[in-house]
């Protein structure tokens, strides 16, 4: 087996097949049933592209993005914490992830996860109302959003205005069908990108098919 670093905490394990993994910053136990690999005394967790849009972006050709050890991340649409747990590996024990989730039943697992992974700060709230958590969340190095709502672009802009440092990266998982089912996905992406252009430089737009249907991940740099 051979290991190749992609970004801090993220690697390709090249064995019989190519597998994306994150180096566990915490325990050697799986978080949500993912496969665990041991390599040269370190623990790696499989990051499956069908379970995470961020992972799918690497399988679709993303080979670098400015997220690294010790970064502060605002994560909107954390759900039970599947992707959050891998972001927790990337930013490591000195990083911070402010994980916002509106659904209480999802947030239960997220809160349990945060008890073990001390770099996760769960916030059970509505990402449409960033003023509710502006006293808790500091200026961040990354804004990651995956909320699948009709007004997702507005939510992203509102949060980035308050929390994202200028020059830093926004990662926006757009679900095109949540915005307009009648339009071609490409057209939805073009319209939404247009709304973002006054505030962001668009670095990449990655179609996540076949791992995630009707989704693209936009990588943006705040002006
Ligand atoms: N990002 C997660 C992952 O990869 O593990 C999956 C996120 S899931 C597709 C979308 C989540 O966004 C759901 O858990 C949903 O409850 C949450 N959500 C939807 N609208 C929201 C809002 N206004 N504020 C916060 N969370 C929201």
Image (spheres, helix red, strand yellow):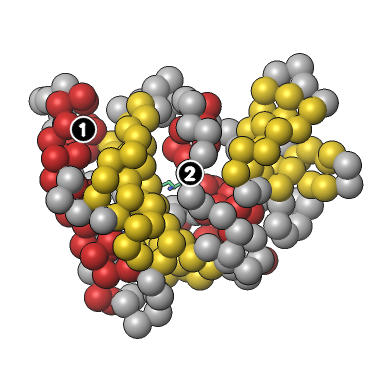
Q: Nearer the viewer, residue 53 or 193?
A: 193
Residue 124 is left or right of residue 47, and the answer is left
> Quarter-wise, where is residue 95 in the image?
bottom right
Q: Where is residue 215 drawn, in percent x and y?
A: 33, 32
Regarding residue 25, the answer to whether it shows in the image is yes
The residue lying furthest to the top in this view is 16
The residue lying furthest to the bottom in this view is 135
Q: Where is residue 176 drawn, in percent x and y?
A: 23, 33
Quadrant of the rendering where the N terminus is positioned = top right
Q: Where is residue 193 drawn, in percent x and y?
A: 19, 39
Circle 2 or circle 1, nearest the eye:
2
Residue at image mark 1: 189
Q: Which mark is residue 65?
A: 2
Residue drawn at point x = 40 percent, y = 75 percent? 138
> Quarter-wise, where is residue 172 in the image?
top left
Quadrant of the rendering where the C terminus is positioned = bottom left
As helix, strand or loop, the secondary structure at mark 2 comes to loop
Q: Nearer the viewer, residue 202 or 46?
A: 202
Q: Could you classify mark 1 by the number of other residues whose Cα lies within 10 Å: few (under 14), some (14-19), or many (20 or more)?
A: many
Q: Which mark is residue 46?
A: none
Residue 123 is left or right of residue 127, and the answer is right
Residue drawn at point x = 53 percent, y = 67 percent? 96
Residue drawn at point x = 89 percent, y = 47 percent? 41
104 shown above or below 62 = below
- Count numbered badges in the picture: 2
Q: Real-space Cα distance between discs 2 and 1?
A: 20 Å
86 shown above or below 204 = below
Regarding residue 30, the answer to whether it shows in the image is no
Q: Could you classify mark 2 by the number of other residues whose Cα lies within 10 Å: few (under 14), some (14-19), or many (20 or more)?
A: few
Q: Quick check: is the Cβ at mark 2 less than 8 Å away from ligand 1? A: no
């Amino acid at each position: 087996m051979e290991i190749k670093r992609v970004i801090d905490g993220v690697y390709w394990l090249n064995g019989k097949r190519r597998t994306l993994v994150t180096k566990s910053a915490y325990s050697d136990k799986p978080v949500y049933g993912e496969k665990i690999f041991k390599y040269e005394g370190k623990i790696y967790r499989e990051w499956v592209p069908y379970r995470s849009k961020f992972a799918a972006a690497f399988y679709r050709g993303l080979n670098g993005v400015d997220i690294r050890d010790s970064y502060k991340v605002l994560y909107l649409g954390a759900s039970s914490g599947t992707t959050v747990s891998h972001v927790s590996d990337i930013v490591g024990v000195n990083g911070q992830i402010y994980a916002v989730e509106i659904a209480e039943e999802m947030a239960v697992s997220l809160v349990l996860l945060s008890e073990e992974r001390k770099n996760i700060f769960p916030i059970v709230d509505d990402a449409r109302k960033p003023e509710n958590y502006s006293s808790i969340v500091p200026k961040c190095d990354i804004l990651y959003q995956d909320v699948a709502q009709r007004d997702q672009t507005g939510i992203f802009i509102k949060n980035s205005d308050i929390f994202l440092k200028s020059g830093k990266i926004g990662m926006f998982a757009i679900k095109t069908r949540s915005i307009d089912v009648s339009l071609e996905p490409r057209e939805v992406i073009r319209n939404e990108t247009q709304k973002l252009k006054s505030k962001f430089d668009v670095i990449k737009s990655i179609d996540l098919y076949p791992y995630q249907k009707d989704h693209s991940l936009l990588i943006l740099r705040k002006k």
